[in-house]
Image (tube, rainbow, N blue to C red):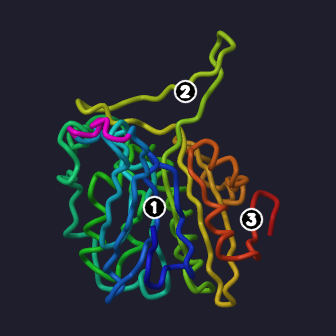
């Protein structure tokens, strides 16, 4: 498969694994900065002439392109597997306001598989943006799109409003000294040892639609410097109250930890564009 045109991040795509081999093959801008297109390809080998796909495929990765972000939707979670956005000095400023924004169902998702606002009522969880609204003040439509529930996960209120908010502000601040800041954010469901000595992945669900509550969240930040060099900063935070005075550096992790836990890949795709990738982890500078 060939893709033409100028790719963001000098041809780098933050490609990630998805069901049935569907992959994010390119994320490009055409015309004005608000127009985002995703091209994806499903690679599936089937027996010749078997007619196995006669009635279609029961499912594959749902890639959705918005004014402000691109996401892969996981119907089992009733939420995103990952959300990818581009920040720069122009995009984080503008006249867009949250005052007219309302959280709403994503009608592009089948009604069996989507969350609604009633799922969050009385749950004790915030509707936590993955692509942050304040990242997209450049366009009211772009900000509005961040309020689709396909861009939302149940998030602990203390985390959402304090330390996670601090991390989002930090990412916006990075646009002052970098050409572009690419942010990929998503939920994690990490195993924990139970009293029987065995490891289990256990998570709560809320509402009549059984919206999955992540145990943790990740944020992978890729800095494109004016020199063309790339810098990688991967974070994991628990979906629970966090010491509001904790430095953000405490949550830096090796990128391999996120790649293994989320089933995603970042480094191989970045290395296609540069041999000067600097990875910043806990204890790094």
Q: Nearer the viewer, mark 3 or mark 1?
A: 1
Outermost residue to the top: 196
Q: CA distance from mark 2 to mark 1?
A: 27 Å
The spot of residue 36 in percent (x, y) is 34, 75
Q: Residue at x 43, y 59 (%)?
A: 83
Residue 220 visible here: yes
Give the secondary structure at mark 2.
Answer: loop
Q: Earlier in the sequence, mark 2 or mark 1?
A: 1
The circle drawn on residue 24 is 1
The circle drawn on residue 193 is none
Quarter where residue 72 is shown: bottom left
Q: CA distance from mark 3 to mark 2?
A: 28 Å
Q: Nearer the viewer, residue 124 or 39?
A: 39
Q: Label 2, on which residue?
A: 201
Give the secondary structure at mark 3.
Answer: loop
Q: CA distance from mark 3 to mark 1?
A: 25 Å
Predominant secondary structure, magenta span? loop
């Amino acid at each position: 498969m060939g893709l033409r045109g100028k790719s963001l991040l000098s041809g780098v795509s933050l490609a990630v694994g998805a069901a049935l081999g569907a992959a994010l093959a390119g994320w490009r801008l055409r015309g004005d900065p608000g127009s985002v297109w995703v091209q994806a390809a499903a690679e599936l080998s089937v027996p010749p002439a078997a007619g196995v796909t006669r009635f279609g495929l029961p499912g594959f990765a749902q890639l959705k392109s918005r004014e402000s972000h691109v996401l892969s939707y996981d119907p089992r979670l009733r939420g995103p597997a990952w959300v990818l956005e581009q920040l720069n000095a122009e995009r984080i400023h503008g006249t867009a306001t949250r005052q007219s924004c309302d959280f709403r169902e994503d009608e592009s998702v089948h009604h069996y598989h989507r969350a609604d606002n009633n799922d969050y009522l009385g749950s004790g969880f915030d509707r936590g943006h993955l692509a942050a609204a304040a990242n997209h003040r450049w366009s009211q439509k772009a900000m509005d799109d961040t309020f689709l529930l396909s861009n939302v996960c149940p998030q602990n209120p203390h985390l959402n409003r304090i330390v996670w908010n601090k991390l989002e502000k930090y990412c916006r601040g990075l646009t002052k000294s970098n050409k572009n800041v690419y942010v990929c954010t998503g939920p994690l469901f990490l195993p924990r040892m139970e009293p029987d000595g065995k490891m289990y992945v256990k998570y709560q669900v809320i509402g009549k639609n059984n919206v999955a509550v992540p145990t943790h969240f990740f944020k992978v930040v890729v800095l494109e410097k004016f020199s063309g060099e790339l810098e990688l900063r991967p974070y994991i935070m628990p979906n629970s109250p966090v010491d509001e005075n904790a430095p953000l550096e405490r949550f830096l992790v090796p990128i391999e930890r996120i790649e293994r836990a989320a089933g995603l890949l970042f480094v191989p795709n970045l290395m296609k564009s540069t041999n000067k990738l600097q990875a910043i982890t806990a204890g790094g500078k």
